[in-house]
Image: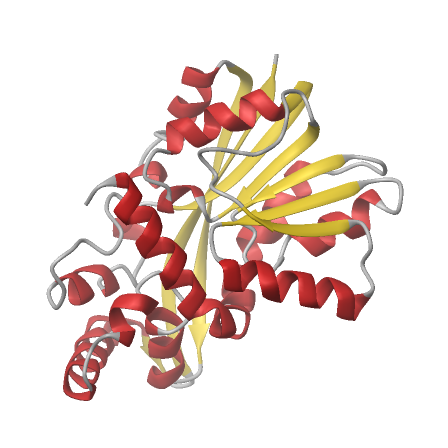
Amino acid sequence: MTPELQKRVQRYGWDKASKYYEDCWEEQLKPAHESLLKIANANVGDKILDVAAGTGLISFPLANKVSHSGQVFATDISEEMVKLGNELALLQKTENITFKQMDAENIDFENNTFDLITCALGLMYFPNPDASISEFFRVLKPGGRAIVAVWGSRKKCGWSEIFPIVDARVKTDVCPMFFNLGEKEILKYPFENSGFIDISIHKIETKLIYSSAEEACDASFLGGPVAMAYSKFDEKTKKEARIEYINSIEPYKTNNGYEIPGEFVIGSAVKN
């Protein structure tokens, strides 16, 4: 898959997932989001870029933290995510946040613009994470910080079979190298290559709690990265894929639903 095709798949896929994303994932991603926000420790008056922001699950807390004297620009490749984010900003009367559609590998801001850049569980979707981290470095002010979260090691993410299950039914890889950045300390290398200093990596083991097989399937097939591929399946193929996925998470079944293991990796660094 070419980088441009991968971006197109991601853009239209997240358009499909946008209306399900918060309901399916807000609680599941909370440990990563809370850890990222704590490490970011945004200050009143900060100018922040939140990349791959989706509908703003961390953008809005950041906007609250920087107060009226600060500003958050939340970017995403998905037009529908951006639309929903701006609608929420209007609904909540959050005036210091703006959602913009933007490619994370070609950030449309001038050099030395931001005090802080965040990217919560988006970097592993980018065709060239190194290019994105280099862009983070460029648009950060000297002394500015970048904080990113990615999914961890494949072997620690019990839901990971979703990718081969879908890949077996489509011709293109849905999400190549998804878990690569979460292995060992791989995440530090894009920061090093871009010139960042004071790089730190820490890992969080978690559990994704679902009350039923249907809820677990909806999160993975409707609200996540395989949404576009899944939408093209006929009903028979959808049913087969869901059954196969339910079988793959059977070891994590409990009396109350499912507790599926997962891992997040948080990386932070400073622009010299």
Q: What x and y, as percent, mark residue 189?
A: 38, 22
Kindly identify the residue that appears in the image at 17 percent across and 76 percent down: 244
Counting every numbered tag in the picture gives 0
Whether residue 178 can be seen here = no
In the rendered image, the vertical position of residue 195 relative to residue 114, given as above or below: above
User: Which colour scheme appears in the figure?
Assistant: secondary structure
Q: What x and y, as percent, mark residue 117?
A: 62, 35
Which of the two residues, 64 or 253, is positioned nearer the viewer here? 64
Q: Is residue 185 left or right of residue 201?
A: left
In the rendered image, the vertical position of residue 54 relative to residue 20, given as above or below: above
Q: Quadrant of the C terminus?
A: top right
Kindly identify the residue that appears in the image at 55 percent across and 55 percent down: 31
> Where on the picture, by quarter, is residue 237?
bottom left
Q: What x and y, as percent, mark residue 256?
A: 42, 85
> Where on the picture, by quarter, is residue 43?
top right
Which of the two residues, 8 or 147, is positioned nearer the viewer here? 8
Whether residue 215 can be seen here = yes
